[in-house]
Amino acid sequence: MARITLRQLLDHAAEHGYGVPAFNINNMEQVLAIMAAAEECDAPVILQASRGARAYAGDVMLAKMVEAAEAMHPTIPICLHQDHGNDEATCFSAIQHGFTSVMMDGSLEADAKTPASYDYNESITRRVAEMAHKVGVSVEGELGVLGSLETGKGDKEDGHGAEGALSHDQLLTDPDQAVAFVRATKVDALAIAMGTSHGAYKFSRKPDGEILAMHVVKAIHERLPGIHLVMHGSSSVPESLQELFNRYGGEMPKTWGVPIEEIQAGIRHGVRKVNIDTDCRLAMAAQIRRIATEKRSEFDPRKFLQPSMDALKTLCRERYEQFGSAGHASKIKPLSLAEMAKRYRAGALDPRIEVSRAA
Ligand code: G3H
Ligand code: 13P
Ligand code: ZN
C-alpha cells in the first residue's frame, strides 16, 4: 500500500477515537517485527527514525527497508516519520528520502541540548511547516521541554535532550501558548511536555498526577480539540521486561514508565501519536541476554535475533490493541503527497483552532 502521511493517519485516528504507537526503527529486525505485528491485527503503522537511526543505518538503507515493508504488507498504510528533527536540513533531507512526516523539534536549539526560546521555536517550526506542506508532508512540532518533574532535569540518558535544570514552566506545556503556537506554525500534530522523558528511568515510583501531568493533556485538548497531541517518552517499561533483563545478567535499577491506562486516558483526550522506543529496545535486549546466558556456545546471530523479533512483535501487537489502532489499517486509503499538497494549498488542512469554553 502507498505510504501515508501523519496528518491523514491521525485525522483517521481522531475520527475513530484511537491512538497510534510510533515505533523507532534502526534495523531490519525492528521493521520486520513491527510490521508482522501490524499485519496480524490490521493496524496502521508509524515507523520513526531519529537522527541517530539515520546515522546508524544510513538513509538509503532505511528508505529501502520501508519500501520492502510496503511490498510485504500491501494492506498496511505506513507513515515514515523523522523523530526529533533538530533543524531545517534534517527535516528536508528526510523528505528527500521519502519520509512522509517530520518532527521539527524547536523546543531545543539545533544542538539538541539547549532549551530554545518560544520565538525561536515558533519561527523555525513555521518555516518547516510552510515548506513541508508545499509537498504534502506533515509536520509535528513540540512545545515545552521533555524532562522529569521529579528531578527537574531533561533526559540525557540516550545522549540527547535538554541539559541543566529546567523549571516547571519549561517542563509543562502552557495551554494558552499551545493555542498561539499551533495558530502561528500550522503544525499537524503537537508534542507536549507533561513530565515524560526518554529512556528507561522516567519515574522513581509509580507515577501519579504530581509527576505525570495528565491534567496538561486535558487542558490543552480542551482548548485545542481539533489538534492531534503527541506523547513522547511513552514507554511503559513493563516490570516483566525489567525482570527478564535482570534475570539474565542485566543491571537495571527498579524504574517506572508511563502506565498503559494513563496513555489510554490521554487517547480519550486527544493524544493520537504515542512514541515508543525504550520498550522495544528492552524487549529485544532481554532476549539477547537470555540466549547469551542459556546457550553459551551459540554464535549464530539469527539465534539471538529471532527470539528478539518475536518478543518485539508481541509487544507491538499489545500496543496496537491497547491503543485501539488494531483493525483500522484496511479501512484507510492513503492519499498521495500531491493530493495532500493540494489540500494544504486550499487551506483545507489548516489547524482547527476552535478555542473552547476553557480558553
Ligand atoms: O528520541 C528518542 C528515541 O528514543 C531515539 O533515540 O536518538 O538513541 O535513536 P536515539
Ligand atoms: P521512550 O524512550 O519512552 O520509548 O520514548 C521514545 C520517544 O519519545 C521517541 O521520540
Ligand atoms: Zn521523543
Image (cartoon, grey):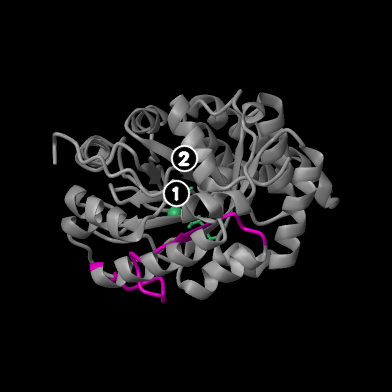
Instruction: Let me know if residue 251 is in the magenta part.
Output: no
> Looking at this view, is 132 or 143 the one in front?
132
Kindly identify which numbered label has been placed on residue 237: 2
Residue furthest front in the image: 346
CB at disc 2 and ligand 2 closer than 8 Å: yes
> Looking at this view, is 123 or 306 the one in front?
123
Q: Label the magenta part by its dominant secondary structure.
A: loop
For the question of whether residue 178 can be seen, the reply is yes
Pick the quarter of the image with the N terminus. top right
In the picture, measured across the screen, residue 47 lies left or right of residue 114, that is right
> Looking at this view, is 193 or 329 the one in front?
329
Where is residue 253 shown, x and y percent of the image? 42, 47
Where is residue 165 shown, x and y percent of the image? 23, 66
Pick the quarter of the image with the C terminus. top left
CB at disc 1 and ligand 2 closer than 8 Å: yes
**Residue located at (46% from left, 41% from top):** 274
Residue under numbered circle 1: 200
Amino acid of disc 1: Ala
Residue furthest left in the image: 358
For the question of whether residue 151 can be seen, the reply is no
Specify few, some or many for label 2: CA neighbours under 10 Å numbering under 14, 14-19, or 20 or more. many
Specify few, some or many for label 1: CA neighbours under 10 Å numbering under 14, 14-19, or 20 or more. many
| Residues at circles 1 and 2 in contact by the CB criterion of under 8 Å | yes
Region in magenta: 98-118
Considering the numbered disc 1 on the image, is that residue within a helix, a strand or a loop? loop
Instruction: Let me know if residue 117 is in the magenta part.
Output: yes
Amino acid of disc 2: Val
Q: Earlier in the sequence, mark 1 or mark 2?
A: 1
Where is residue 234 shown, x and y percent of the image? 43, 43
Does 37 appear above or below 50? above
